[in-house]
Image (tube, grey):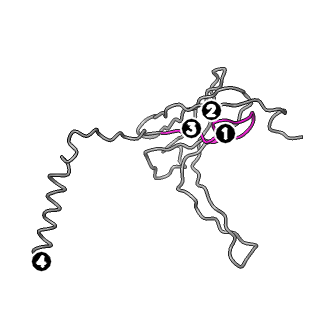
Amino acid sequence: MDTPRTAMAVAAWLWAAVVAPHAWVGAAPAEKPPALQLEVLTPQAAQYERIEFRVQTDRSYRNPFDPDEVEMALRIRGPQGAEVVVPAFLGQDYRRQQVPGDPRRDWCYPASMPGWKARFATGQVGRHTAVAVRRDAAGTTESAPVAFEVRPKPGRGFVRA
């Protein structure tokens, strides 16, 4: 039996079980991150331009594509007070690379982990606010609101002549 190793293991276990839980007595408790966080990736856009959002959640789901398991959406309030609900989707960014030696083929590599996203475009000029809403077996959770600004754009809208 290796006595020094056993003594070290016992000392480490005692420190972890007895000393470590009390080592930070008097320190402020760590803040828990919000359960649902909404980030607007396009804080300013012209009319009819795409505004993108990222939703971060503290939960994962067995099947995030099943609306009976989880439903994620944005509730967007326009400058005049009208609300619209925009469904969010689970997406993942990819990086495209050409296959070496074969210019006719490409490979796509994940560039990030999958995450919830939403996209929105409007013709209403002014300040808008958005809130992410998650419905699952635990109930309904809302994020803190975020704001974005839509400025006027010359032209008629989405269709180009």
Q: Of marks 4 and 3, which one's residue comes earlier in the chain?
A: 4
The amino acid pointed to by label 3 is: Ala
Residue 47: x percent and y percent? 75, 33
> Is there CB contact under 8 Å for labels 4 and 1?
no
Q: Is 9 contained in the magenta span?
A: no
Q: Earlier in the sequence, mark 4 or mark 2?
A: 4
Task: Give residue 88's position: percent from left, percent from top.
Answer: 59, 42
- Residue, disc 4: 2
Q: Position of residue 24 (x, y in %)?
A: 22, 45
Which numbered dot is residue 148?
2
Question: In the rendered structure, which amino acid carries the disc numbered 4?
Answer: Asp
Q: Quadrant of residue 30?
A: top left
Side of 68 relative to 125 (left or right):
left
Q: Residue furthest top?
A: 80
Tell me if residue 155 comes above or below residue 111 in the rendering: above
Question: Which is more foreground, mark 1 or mark 2?
Answer: 2
Residue at mark 3: 73
Q: Which mark is first along the chain, 1 or 3? A: 1
Amino acid type of disc 1? Ile
- Gap between marks 2 and 3, in whole Å? 17 Å
